[in-house]
Image (cartoon, rainbow, N blue to C red):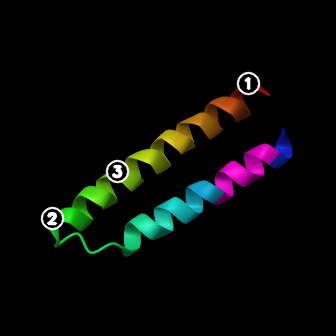
Amino acid sequence: MKDQLKRLKEIEVKAKTIANSIDVNCADSQKQYEELAQLANELGGVINASEASN
């Protein structure tokens, strides 16, 4: 389980890094940013819930 949480955290950081590199001045890019940021936030919630249950 620890290895899975570590991997999820790595994915979360990567998603946030990609989201922060997107040009939000472009409408299509802004939509991609919002979707990716939402996914990163949801992933963070899963990680927090998993850590709390252990």
Identity of the amino acid at label 2?
Answer: Ala
51 or 7, nearer to the observer: 7
How far from the left and from the top, in percent, is residue 51?
Answer: 72, 35
Disc 2: which residue: 27
Disc 1: which residue: 53
First in sequence, mark 1 or 2: give its number.
2
The overriding secondary structure of the stretch rendered in magenta is: helix
- For residue 53, above or below residue 4: above
Q: CA distance from mark 1 to mark 2?
A: 39 Å
Residue numbers of the magenta segment: 4-10
Disc 3: which residue: 35
Identity of the amino acid at label 3?
Answer: Glu
17 or 31, nearer to the observer: 31
Q: Residue furthest right?
A: 2
Other-residue count near label 3 (Cα within 10 Å), few / some / many at <14 / 14–19 / ≥20: few
Q: Are marks 1 and 2 in contact (CB under 8 Å)?
A: no
First in sequence, mark 3 or 2: give its number.
2
Residue at 84% across, 38% down: 1
Q: Residue furthest front?
A: 28
Q: Which element carries disc 3, helix, strand or loop?
A: helix
Please tell me in which quadrant of the rendered image residue 50 appears: top right
Other-residue count near label 2 (Cα within 10 Å), few / some / many at <14 / 14–19 / ≥20: few
Residue at 64% across, 39% down: 47
Identity of the amino acid at label 1?
Answer: Ser
How far from the left and from the top, in percent, is residue 28?
Answer: 21, 64
Other-residue count near label 1 (Cα within 10 Å), few / some / many at <14 / 14–19 / ≥20: few
